[in-house]
Structure formats: structure tokens, C-alpha cells
Amino acid sequence: MNIDFLHDATAMTDQIVAWRRDLHQHPELAFQETRTASIVAQELQTLGLEVQSGVGQTGVVGILGGISDGPTVLLRFDMDALPITEENETEYVSKNKGVMHACGHDGHTAIGLAVAHLLNRYRGRLHGQVKLIFQPAEEIAQGAQAMIEDGVLDDPVPDVALGLHLWNAIPVGQVGITRGTMMAGADIFEITIQGKGGHGAAPHQTRDPLLAAAHVVNALQSVVSRNIDPLDSAVLSVTSLNAGTAFNVIPPAAHLKGTLRTYKHSVRTVAASRLVEIVEGISHALGCESKLDITPLTPPLVNDPEVTTLVSQAIAPYIEPNALLPDLRTMGAEDMAIFLDRIPGCFILVGSANDRRNLNYPHHHPRFDFDEAALPLGAAILASAVAAYVIPG
Ligand code: NI
């Protein structure tokens, strides 16, 4: 008997939307997802899953065991919101001022609960087990690591890891499932240029760090344009520059921050070494000292080719043939990459925009919202992907 997960998920739409809207009204920041986590834990317990809370501070793990041995499939969902003041005027607008689900993680959590329900119905046909993990702190790229340090990848060790992200860059109905590298590895860099401050009218008595900072920002633009192979991808953005407090004072120091995004280790190495050379060289040439810290945030997100093929086949019946996008990539980063660095798997981008209804603001925008028709579709997609591993046809 073939299972129609889309039929089952569609029948659950009211419940999934209710979960999502409740979570949307009560968003919680990274590592503070206690209300969200307790709702998740309670739902999973009600279904009879083996539940563990407090994994990676506020994370929740639920294990759905089958009737016999088989593969362990890890399903990962994220729960955290962002420090953004919501500007939408919906009936389910955030009640937590200054905090907003502006990335769709409320939808991911609701989808996770729905997938638990969908798969639980077929527990009697399940060979293997499903490890559902609800992760904190994705937005600061610390939650996956925290859960791994708390042993989330041990006992049982997952054979495959799956996850999804609602994606407003594409309309609802379209689904991005890309083999190989799909999202960038991200680094944060912080620069301090130390000079010697003084009177704005006596620059010859100073060593101006602001001038050095301006040259550094300009010269860093040469890294992608002149040091990286044009057929490779990289982003190097200076996103913060602070120096000085008064019009007649040359400040003693300037501070810069930014991000480096790459798909390949070799490209990252070239960009990072040019960053060091440019910051040191220009600072030195202009009489200043420099300090540079590069902190890795996430590795590139790489979808395992075999898993991607199997999952693409499993979800194909629920998607229009030309709506399955095999080449969707972004320079955005995701800490799901940390799981996929250890466990072969696949991360799926589920289209959620609806231009006609103005549900097309980008992620992290104060007016971000999505078409909730993506919720049952997302749940059906993940359930069928799991079934490909643990429910023999
Ligand atoms: Ni997100």
C-alpha cells in the first residue's frame, strides 16, 4: 500500500497552521526557546516518542522507534527567532516586542511536529528509527554545535540527516534540492587598526587609523575581483566600520567587521590569507598597527549526491515536474552544515513566497511572512523522504 503523505498532511493543515501561528506570536531568541521547547516536548510525548529535553541548552530530541532494526534517520528543525521588531499587521503578529520569527523557524517547528504525527501513524511499518531534533540558536550558528557537544549524534548514530528551510526567494510549490554544495561556508572577521590620535588640525602629529581603515575597505574589494578564480564563488563584505567621535579629533583606533563566504576550502584559504596581507600591509604602510581575528562560523553546506538522488525521487510525486529545482544555491549560511559535515544527508529549500498576496519579503525583513500552504507540503516532503529509508514499499 502506497502512502500519500501529502493527502495526510493536507488533512492536518488547520493544526499545522495553528501551531505555526502560536509560535509566531511567541518568538524566542537563541538559547531562550523554553516555551517553544516545552510545546515540542509535550507534543512528542503525547505521541509516545522517547523525548529528551535540554539538549544543547534548550534543544529537544524525540525518537520514534519502529518495529524492527534499520537505518536511523535524523530530522533537524530549528526553533529560534530574531531580534527584529515585526512590522506585519496580521492577527498572529509577534506579542514579544523586539523579537520576531522573521526567518520561518516557526514554520519549521510546526512542520517538525506534523512530520512526527505523519510518521507515527505508520509506526507499525517502520523498520529503523527516526530521530527528530529541534535545535536552538540557528541564527547565531551555535545551536547545532551545542547539541552535538551534548551527544545528539551518538546512540543511535544517524545514518542520514535531513532538514528543510522555507524559502521566500521562490514561490510556494517550487522546491530546491541541489546535489553537492548548496550554501556557503561563513567566517566572521574583526579588525582593529591602532594608530595615534590627535588634533584634527594637526594630522602630521598623528598616525590616522581612519585613513588606513578607508584604504583597507577599498583594497579588500580586490580579493574577490583579483585573487579568486572567476569561476569560483566568494563574498567578502565589510559590514561595520567605527572610528572617531568628534569633527576635530583624529581617533586613536578604527574597528571593522565583516563576513567572508566561500564554497570551497581552497578559496577560503586564498581569501583569508589576502585578508591578512591587506590589513597588515596597508596598516603598516600608513604607520598603524593592526589586529585581525577570523572566526569560522559554519562550513559550506554540502548535500550528499546519493541521498539527494534518493530524496528527489521520493518527493517527486508531490511536486510539479518543472517545480523541482536541482540547481538552487545561495551564499547564505546555515548551521545544518555542521550536521551534514558529519552525517551524509540533504537540506531542502521549500518555496514559500506568494507575490499575489505580498508574501514575498526576504528572510530577516520586519515584514517577512510566508504562504502557509508551504507547511503541509514541507511536512509531506520530509515524511516521504524519511519513508524512503525506513518504510519499505
Ligand atoms: Ni533560517
Image: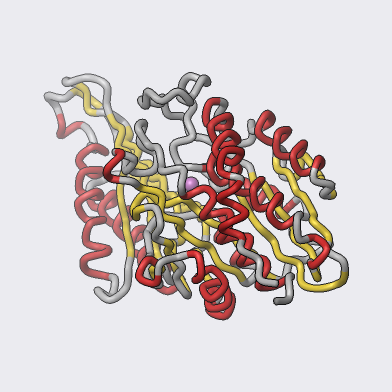
Residue 229 placement (x, y as % from top left): 28, 75
In front: 189, or 384?
384
Residue 43 placement (x, y as % from top left): 74, 39
Res 338 visible: no
From the viewer's perspective, tell me whether residue 32 is left or right of residue 204.
right
Residue 8 placement (x, y as % from top left): 62, 54
Q: Quadrant of residue 156?
A: bottom right
Quadrant including the N terminus: bottom right
Q: Residue at x 60, y 67 (%)?
A: 341
Q: Residue at x 49, y 53 (%)?
A: 165
Residue 323 placement (x, y as % from top left): 37, 66
Res 183 visible: yes
Q: Residue furthest left?
A: 201
Q: Residue furthest right?
A: 68
From the viewer's perspective, tell me whether residue 190 is left or right of residue 144.
left
Give the image's coloring scheme. Answer: secondary structure
Q: Quadrant of residue 68?
A: bottom right
Residue 316 drawn above or below residue 7? below
Q: Residue at x 29, y 38 (%)?
A: 358
Q: Residue at x 58, y 56 (%)?
A: 7
